[in-house]
Amino acid sequence: MRLILCLAAGLTAVACGPNPSDSGGTSDGGPPETMQMHEFFIAAEEAYCGWAATCGAYETADVCLAHEFFDVWYQTNLLASGVFSAGNTFGPRGTAVKYLLAAHDAGRIEFDAQAATDCLAYVKSRGCDRPESLVPDEAQAAGIAACKAVFRGTMVRNGPCYSAAECAAEDGAEVVCGLNPSCVDACCVGGCRVLSGVPQGEPCTSQSRCEDGTYCAIDPNTGQGTVCSKQVGIGAACPFGNECATGTYCDFNTAQCVKLGQVGEPCPFGECAPGLYCGEPQGDGVRVCLEFAAQGEACAYYANGCRALDNVCDQDSHTCVKMPTVGQDCFQFSICAPAAACHYTPTQNQPLCLARAELGEACGERYDEFNGFYESMECLGGLACDGTDLNTNHCVVPSVTTVCPVPELSALPDAT
C-alpha cells in the first residue's frame, strides 16, 4: 500500500502525500540518496511490485501496490526470495512495521542504508526465472545478503526480544527470537537464541544440528546418534543416508555417496546439480537430470521444469506455457497464475482458476455438505481475512491493533 510513513510522537503511521522530495527520493522514483528507515518500507514495496508486475504476478505495479502492505507488515523473505506472494488466508504476515520502528528508536535495531539500497537494486534487477532454475552466483548471494543485512539486531544471546530482527547475527549460525510456548499473554517476551551447529567430535542426537561439513553419526547397533563427524565424499559408504558431503548424495541402491546428477544423467532419487531438475523426458519412468526450459520449449512429464515463474509444463503438449488464469482449467497441476487459485466449485466437477478474493469479498473455509468437500478462498496479495469462515468472513486491509512495547533489558527470559 503506497503510503509514506511519517514519524510522529508515539510512532503513529500517518498517510502523507507521496512526494519523493519529501522523503529525499530521487526524481526517477528510486530510493533516496540517504535512505531513512521509515522510507525503506515504501521503497521495498515499490521495488517488489515493479519486479512482480514485470514477471507476471500482477497486471500492473499499481495493482500490486494496492494489495501489498510492506509499510504495515514487512516481509523480509518475500522481498529477497524471488518468488511471488502467495494468497493470504488467515491474517497478516511478516513483522509489524510499528514495532520495528519502536525497536530502532530503542536501540535494539540498527538500519543499514547502504544494505537497503543494495537490496532494492538487486530486487529490481533480478530476472523472472524461478530460483531453483538458477545456479547460485556471487551477484545473487550478495543481493540476498544485502536484504538480510538491512536490519541488524543488537541483542546478544538470551537478550529480550519480540522479533528476530532484534537479535545480533553470528557467523555460521541461525539466530531466532525464541518464545516461551507456554506463554498465553498478548505480549510474550522472547530471548535471542543462536541455533549454532554442534562441533565435530561432540555428542549429538537425531535432533542435533551438526556444524557445516559434518553429520550426526549413527550407532548401527542402537540406531542412536553418537558424535558429529566429518562428511564423506564420492564412493564412501552411506548406510544411513546422512553422511555425504555437499555436492553429493547417497545412492540408496549402492549405499555409496555419488556426485549430483548432471544433464542427461539418471536421478532415481531426484538429486540433480544446482540449476537442473529431475524429470521423465519420454514419460517411460526413466528419470534424468534436465535443464529448465523457456516458454514454448519442451519440458518433461510429471514435473514443472519451466524456467519462468509464471510458466507451467503442459502435460498434453509437453511444452512450457503460461499458467492458467481466471476461468481456465487447472486440473493438471492444481496451479494457477499468481492472482488466481485452483478450486473445485459446487457446480463444477473440474477444477477451475478463480480470482483470489479482493477487499470486502468472502474468504476462509467451509464444508460443502451437499457436494462433500471443503471450499476455501484466499485473499489477494497481502489482504488479510478477518476470520476463517467462508460464510461470514471477508478480506480486509491488514491492520496493527496491538504493538507490544519493546521489552526492558531486565526482562530477560529463562536462558535455557
Image: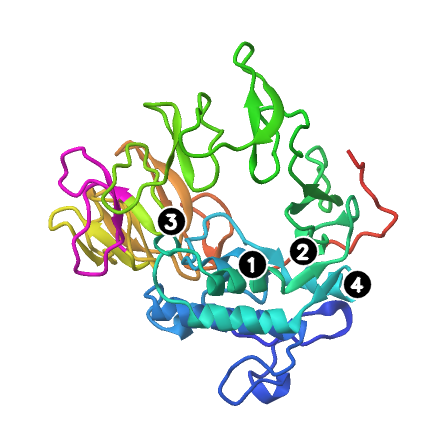
Magenta-colored span: 278-306
Which quadrant holds residue 125? bottom left
At label 3, the amino acid type is: Pro
- Answer yes or no: is residue 345 visible: no
Find the distance from the CA under tag 1 to the CA under tag 4.
20 Å
> Considering depth in this image, is 55 or 215 the residue closer to the camera?
215
- Answer yes or no: is residue 123 visible: yes
Check disc 3 and report its element: helix, strand or loop: loop
- The reply to whether callout 1 and callout 2 are in contact (CB within 8 Å) is yes
> Considering depth in this image, is 367 or 178 the residue closer to the camera?
178
Dot label at residue 76: 1
Check disc 4 and report its element: helix, strand or loop: loop
Dot label at residue 165: 2
Q: Name the main secondary structure of what is drawn in magenta.
A: loop
The residue sitting at 40% across, 73% down in the picture is 61
The residue sitting at 16% across, 46% down in the picture is 315
Mark closer to the chain start, 2 or 3: 2
